[in-house]
Image (cartoon, rainbow, N blue to C red):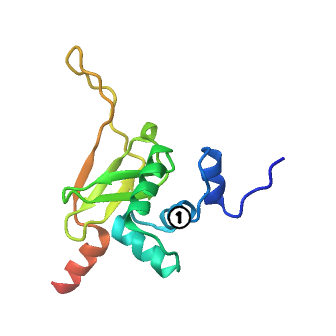
């Protein structure tokens, strides 16, 4: 029986047949420990705070690999910024809430795009995106405090 790796993140990476690298493990751990979705810059700040040197290209490639393996998912906001959250392969499509004030994106796991729609003949859907826009709880509290 193989010896378990040091962290659950490393075990997930190994289970996908990927090379367990310091950067892959650290990035996945950052995503797993965050309550919010994070953009590239947010992740870079966390890596630096944890003393992990990295370069932008490696970070981009790592995030792409995590998404391809279903260990993270990506949502692109109206500002065209990509944000990432641990978990969620393409088969687990769900809706998102985008705060138009601060840019926070929240996964709404309980809301799934409805597959009971019909498309014209010859059209084959590959993915669906459902995004709600508004103000998050934090921005709502701040706005209420200013009033």
Q: Is residue 83 left or right of residue 146?
A: right
Under circle 1, the secondary element is: helix
x then y, percent, for residue 124 = 29, 22
x then y, percent, for residue 12 = 62, 52
Please, is residue 101 above or below residue 10 in the view?
below
Q: Residue furthest right?
A: 1
x then y, percent, for residue 90 = 42, 39
Nearer the observer, 100 or 144: 100
x then y, percent, for residue 138 = 31, 74
Please, is residue 49 above or below residue 54 in the view?
below
Q: Residue furthest top?
A: 121
Specify the quadrant of the image occupied by residue 92: top left
Nearer the observer, 6 or 77: 6
Specify the quadrant of the image occupied by residue 42: bottom left
Residue at point 32%, 26% (across, down): 116
Residue at point 46%, 78% (across, down): 48
Which residue position holds label 1?
23
């Amino acid at each position: 029986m193989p010896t378990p790796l040091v962290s659950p993140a490393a075990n997930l990476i190994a289970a996908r047949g990927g090379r367990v690298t310091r950067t892959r493990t650290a990035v996945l751990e950052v995503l797993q420990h965050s309550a919010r979705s994070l953009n590239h810059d947010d992740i870079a700040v966390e890596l630096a705070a944890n003393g992990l040197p990295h370069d932008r290209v490696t970070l981009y490639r790592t995030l792409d690999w995590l998404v391809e393996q279903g260990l993270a998912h990506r949502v692109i906001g109206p500002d065209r910024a990509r944000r990432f959250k641990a978990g969620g392969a393409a088969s687990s499509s769900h809706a998102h809430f985008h705060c138009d004030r601060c840019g926070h994106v929240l996964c709404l796991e309980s809301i799934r795009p409805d597959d009971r729609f019909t498309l014209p003949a010859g059209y084959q859907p590959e993915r669906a995106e459902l995004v709600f826009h508004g103000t998050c709880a934090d921005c709502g509290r701040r706005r209420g405090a200013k009033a």
